[in-house]
């Protein structure tokens, strides 16, 4: 049942993302901010989305962004350009291109299965790399669904305990997470499209 529901939610999101009226870059940026907020909560340093946004916007040349700023910048860079080794390397500069390629191509099969396999592969080799694991999981999901850009979905729907699960338990957690986060993304997309239409008419 969870597989069916997550598939339906992702199919609906896929259709919504195909509409020209949806400001794609703005939607991805909002979802990236939400993902960064979730990652900070996972790390035990909760920061609100507004605080994360301000941290990045108020940076001056030469300033160190700190953990919160780095997390926010990683997600924002991950969604700015089409999914590729180079784009992910820009988001996660401490990783080697060969490692990025290996993690990006880790899974085969259905979209959520691929995402869960990428998540597991990163956490197996780097157990504390929650942020990187979630970025790679969303990148694998995007590739499996035929999306050019990474759309942050999993971080907002998963719980910290879900990241420590394995096998089928972790796959089911990913299905469960995507049901809620895809619905939320659709709602955001519709709201942003409506606002964009209103601003054009005013």
Image (cartoon, helix red, strand yellow):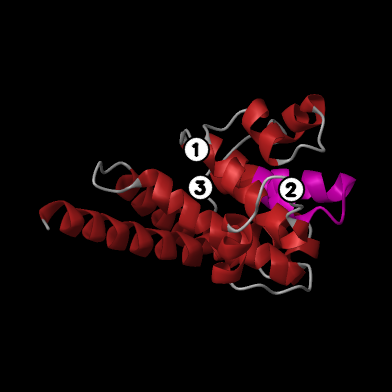
Residue 123: in magenta span: yes
Q: CA distance from mark 2 to mark 3?
A: 14 Å
Helix, strand, or loop for circle 2?
A: helix
Residue 76: in magenta span: no
Note whether residue 172 is visible.
yes
Side of 21 relative to 9 (left or right): left
Crowding around mark 3 (Cα neighbors within 10 Å: few <14, some 14 to 19, many 20+) is many
Relative to the observer, which residue lies in front, 162 or 76? 76
Earlier in the chain: of badge 1 and badge 2, it is 2
Helix, strand, or loop for circle 3?
A: loop
Question: Residue 149, which numbered label?
Answer: 1
Q: Is residue 77 above or below residue 199?
A: above
The residue identified by callout 2 is: 132
Q: CB of mark 1 within 8 Å of CB of mark 3?
A: yes
Q: Magenta stretch?
A: 116-136
Q: Where is residue 18 drawn, in percent x and y?
A: 31, 41
The residue identified by callout 3 is: 151
């Amino acid at each position: 049942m969870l597989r069916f529901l997550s598939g339906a939610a992702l199919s609906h999101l896929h259709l919504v993302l195909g509409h020209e009226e949806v400001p794609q870059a703005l939607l991805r940026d909002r979802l990236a901010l939400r993902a960064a907020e979730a990652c900070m909560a996972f790390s035990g340093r909760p920061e609100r989305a507004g605080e994360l946004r301000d941290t990045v916007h108020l940076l001056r040349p030469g300033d160190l962004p700190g953990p919160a700023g780095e997390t926010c910048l990683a997600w924002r860079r991950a969604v700015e350009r089409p999914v590729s080794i180079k784009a992910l390397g820009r988001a996660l500069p401490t990783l080697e291109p060969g490692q990025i390629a290996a993690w990006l191509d880790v899974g085969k099969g259905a979209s959520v299965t691929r995402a869960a396999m990428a998540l597991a592969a990163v956490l197996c080799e780097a157990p504390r790399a929650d942020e990187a694991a979630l970025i790679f999981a969303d990148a694998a999901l995007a590739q499996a669904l035929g999306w050019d850009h990474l759309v942050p979905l999993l971080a907002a729907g998963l719980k910290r305990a879900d990241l420590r699960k394995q096998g089928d338990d972790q796959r089911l957690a990913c299905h469960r997470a995507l049901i809620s986060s895809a619905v939320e993304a659709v709602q955001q997309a519709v709201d942003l499209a409506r606002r964009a239409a209103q601003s054009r008419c005013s």
